[in-house]
Image: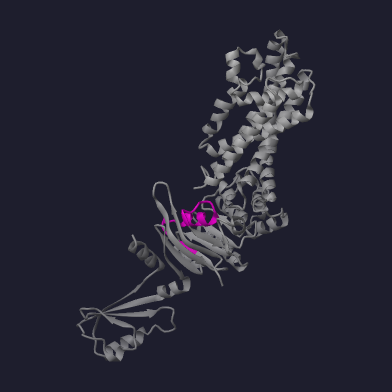
Amino acid sequence: MSPIVSVKNLRKSYAGGFEALKSVNLDIEEGEILALLGPNGAGKTTLISTICGITVPTSGTVTVGGHDTQTAFRAARNLIGLVPQEINLEPFETVMNTVSFSRGLFGKKKDDAFVEDILRKLSLHDKKDNKIMMLSGGMKRRVLIAKALSHEPKVLFLDEPTAGVDVELRKDMWDVVADLKASGVTIILTTHYIEEAEAIADRVGVINKGEILLVQDKSDLMRQLGQKQLKIELNEATSRIPDALSAYDLSLSDDGLMLTYSYDTKAERTGITTLLNELQAAGLQLKDLQTAQSSLEDIFVGLVKEKA
Amino acid sequence: MNFNAIWTIYIFEMRRFFRTMTQSLVSPVLSTSLYFVVFGAAIGSRIDEVEGVSYGAFIVPGLIMLSVMTQATSNASFGIYFPKFIGTIYELLSAPVNFLEVVAGYVGAAATKALFIGLVILVTAFFFVDIEIAHPIAMLAFLVLTCVSFALLGFIIGIWAGNFEQLQLIPLLVITPLVFLGGSFYSISMLPPVWQAITLFNPVVYLISGFRWSFFGTADVGIGLSLFAIAFFTALCIGFIWWIFKTGWRIRQ
């Protein structure tokens, strides 16, 4: 199946020479949730803005649903909903009017029942006649989502939807995203929060300094994360791993004093007990034991530093 | 064409107008009444007639033009500057709309408001002076064209402005002097020859002159020239706005 969003060699440089995006390539599959992780200034917002038409690319192409965002901008943009990072709303308008405005702007006929239905799903229905300025910060974020959904988009971009939002509302937001995915909407969200990517994404992309460093299935990433290491320090150096232990995923340090055993914490059996028994049987004396686990954060920090 | 989008922007902007209806109408009506009292009754009583028309009646077209031009400009400039200021412009830039649709929505609404105010001032004028409109259809056409062309100018100012001060700058420093010096309160034939020649470089002269012709059948400059001037000004503004959207000047990075 061809991707719903396809970004090819996308570059964006500004007049001062700053390169916000350096030849970005990215395919987003229909129906998935892709989380773009990256530090501040990594190019997350520039990437989203360029796909959505707010920023003009220096070179490269973007297609949405097969439509080029430059040459067939109407068809492409009709498929896109955008929830910006900043809370940009007309303060004196009512919730209902401001959401209906978005729908009209995308060329859709006025449909109060449909808009009210969106408001209901986002727990905003009782506020529909309130002015935006009367709403709390969390409610305003929901209004932004309602606006983005008002024209029934196929692809929804959420730019840091939970930045500066309290824990409870963040969980609510994750539920909203899960519901949207269930309704068939493809979702691309940017975030600083690794736990957010872990909680809701199907795939995780890491972006830094205008480059995509990695895009991987979250489950693969989690498998890497599920890997834990047991470091076994020996009393006396050994020249090789005893044959009896060849079934275990073991490595020996150069000085022969440290054995490292990698295992999957999510597996039914970790094999630690039998390994320790067999070590004893093989006549190896243990001095100390320690375990270590890498987190998504470690992978993320490692990637970002590596390329720095 | 995305007609739904044009209509949506238009209605959204008109709603702002109706929300502030009192301010929108009271202020022009009050200032026009003041002009009539000062220029019409106090000073005008000492001026006989200008080109065969009583002075009170003579200033009516100029007064309407003065209000319509400033209102059209300020409404349109505010209309597009406000989304820029509060950040909601992201939605216009990411929506499936082209420059014509955005302009039609914003400029259409600003021009409608200005037209409405112009007509209210005209009605107010009937309370103060006796006037007859020689060419009502031409009068309306001139009024509509002026509303549209100055709303286009206002749209450009709104895109250009980086803050609220700049938003006020052009109307205050350029439009008001041009309107005052464009024959709102006098016939340019009353000026010394040198000033008459200089005045002909003021585009507003042609608009006020044409508009006055539609009331009294007499004009400072030919009606054809007036129409050409307003068409040229409108085309210039549309061309500039087309360039703004093509290059993304001040709106799209």
Q: Position of residue B241 (x, y in %)?
A: 58, 41
- What segment is highlighted magenta in the picture? A35-59
Instruction: Using residue A133 as the reference point, say whether residue B209 is left or right of it.
Output: right
Instruction: Using residue A41 as the reference point, say whether residue A241 is left or right of it.
Output: left
Closer-to-camera residue (A276/A202)? A202
Q: Is residue B24 shown in magenta?
A: no
Name the residue located 26 percent from the left edge and 89 percent from the top edge: A242
Q: Is residue A57 shown in magenta?
A: yes
Locate residue B153: give its quadrant: top right
Q: Position of residue A297 (x, y in %)?
A: 39, 65
Closer-to-camera residue (A293/A34)? A34
Quadrant assignment for the C terminus of chain A: bottom left
Name the residue located 34 percent from the left edge and 77 percent from the top edge: A229
Q: Position of residue A13 (x, y in %)?
A: 43, 52
Q: Residue furthest top?
A: B46
Q: Position of residue A155 (x, y in %)?
A: 58, 62
Name the residue located 26 percent from the left edge and 90 percent from the top edge: A282
